[in-house]
Image (cartoon, grey):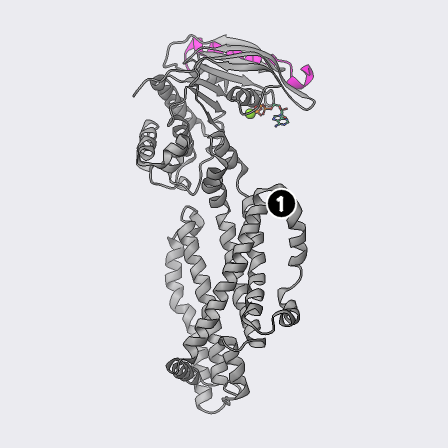
Amino acid sequence: MSKHKGAALTLSQVSKRFGETDVLHGVDLSIEPGSFVAIIGKSGCGKSTLLRVILGLEPASTGHVSSDSDAAHARLVFQEPRLLPWASVAANVAVGLGERGDGPEGVAAAREALADVGLAAKADDWPSTLSGGQRQRVALARALVSHPTLLALDEPLGALDALTRIEMQSLLENVWQAQGFTALLVTHDVGEAVALADRVLLIDAGRVALDQPIDLPRPRRRGDAAFAALEGAILERLLDAPASAEAR
Amino acid sequence: MSRYQDRKERFPLAWIVPGVLLFLWQVSASLGWLPATILPAPSAVLAAGWALTLDGTLPANLGVSTLRALAGLVIGGGIGFGLGLLTGLSRISERLLDPTLQMVRNVPHLALIPMVIIWFGIEEEARLFLVALGVFFPIYLNTLHGIRNVDPQLIEMGRVYGMSPRRLFRRVILPGALPAILVGLRYALGIMWLTLIVAETIAAKSGIGHMAMAAREFMRTDVVVLSILIYALLGKLADSATKALERRFLRWNPAYRR
Ligand SMILES: Nc1ncnc2c1ncn2[C@@H]1O[C@H](COP(=O)(O)OP(=O)(O)OP(=O)(O)O)[C@@H](O)[C@H]1O
Ligand SMILES: [Mg+2]
């Protein structure tokens, strides 16, 4: 598989407000190309908003987001699979290619992306015949088929059972290592963040409250003492963090 | 699978009651208990159907009625679908048009018959107008409803994945609205035949309804019953056609898969 360069990102003084609500204020951040960054924080702290601002789906109120390569190409994986029920699995993946997905090359690329997530055999099935985990893998294939330089994932595994989650985490780690995109993963699960990320960002009161590098060798094992210590420390910070609402 | 087997088992059972009724009807008519002026024997109805087919009356009238029904459906359904798309896709159009249409909807279209006869006489336009008006509302309402109820998460996905408005419509909105649109079509087909029966019975010089009314003047109850049965058959045919459309276009939906 070809190695695609990851995008580097720089956020300078990014703020976002919705009417009276100040969601992000003055976020400064720079993200290494090809790195895996996890974003955690309490519900409603603005993780999704940060992701959407980075992807340009929401304009920042002030400040700006810049990316190194002019060919920066971002894809988003939602918490739900959001597959088109009336399109075959392969056609759903081809959605990620846009107009290019209509031709035979599109179908071939879609099948290749499906093979990467281990679902080559399901290409011609309807999404309704897949399990929840398989649907989310199709959604991942749809995001990856266009070879993005930035992959943003907003709690993509939140709805899956524990075992499927762990399988999906190693799948995600594998495709990330194989393809070299920059990954931004929003998650509620500190263990997941520590298992996958090079760096964990804790968002609180509209700022990056903790920026924790994770240097554990891969593949990481949840039972390890170093893993558990890091997970415990980050969880502690997450729980200690004053509630966002009070900080406002 | 089990539903399938159920249906197979119920099949012969379902035909017993109609079969017995038909048999009793035929026997009481043959024995003279049921005067032909009240209800002719099934065999007499069949015979009338055969005779009218041979002399060309039935095919001609059937053709005229079918053509009217389809023309009315295309005109009324087309306008309903177009306006449904317009109001479904644009809030401004909805605010501008929908309240008026909802108000007009409360007028039973058959109540307009006296007005329609004054406007068009008993010409072809009168029937077309009534059928078109009748099928307009179910198609309009269901198209609007279908578009409004397309999963907003899918629409957001389409936008985030860079679909142009046209592509979004073709790949997400239209297929998402299709189940509702087909429900509308099914209602519309029912209304289509009903409207045509009334319109042809009251004001027509041809068609199945006219054939029935003409037969009534000569107390030809066999022809009247024949006409009624043909309407029933046409209604069933239209219903099966929409079911076939649903199976074809909604294959993806487990509820429609065989
Ligand atoms: N479009 C919007 N309009 C108004 N307020 C919004 C909008 N989007 C988000 N918000 C507000 O911004 C805040 C942060 O929302 P966001 O969805 O980013 O939180 P989150 O960290 O992703 O939460 P969760 O973990 O529950 O997904 C919330 O208070 C929310 O109400
Ligand atoms: Mg969120």
Chain letter, disc 1 residue: B
Quadrant occupied by the C terminus of chain A: top right
- Provide residue B144's location: percent of width, then percent of height: 57, 48
Residue density around tag 1, few if under 14, some if 14–19, many if 20 or more, within 10 Å: some
Give the side of residue B232 with respect to residue B120, left or right: left
Quadrant occupied by the N terminus of chain A: top left
* Nearer to me, B6 or B26: B26
- Provide residue B97's location: percent of width, then percent of height: 64, 49
Q: Amino acid at mark 1?
A: Ser
- Provide residue B32's location: percent of width, then percent of height: 47, 92
Compared to residue B258, the image places residue A223 above or below, namely: above
Specify the segment rendered in magenta: A222-248
Give the side of residue A85 with respect to residue A209, left or right: left
* Residue A134 visible in the displayed image: no
Compared to residue A11, the image places residue B112 above or below, namely: below
* Nearer to me, B182 or B31: B182
- Residue at 68% x, 55% y is B103
Magenta-drawn stretch contains A228: yes
State which quadrant residue B122 falls in.
Answer: bottom right
Magenta-drawn stretch contains B48: no
* Residue B78 visible in the displayed image: yes
Compared to residue A187, the image places residue B87 above or below, namely: below
Q: Quadrant of ligand 2?
A: top right
- Residue at 42% x, 7% y is A215
Residue holding disc 1: B93
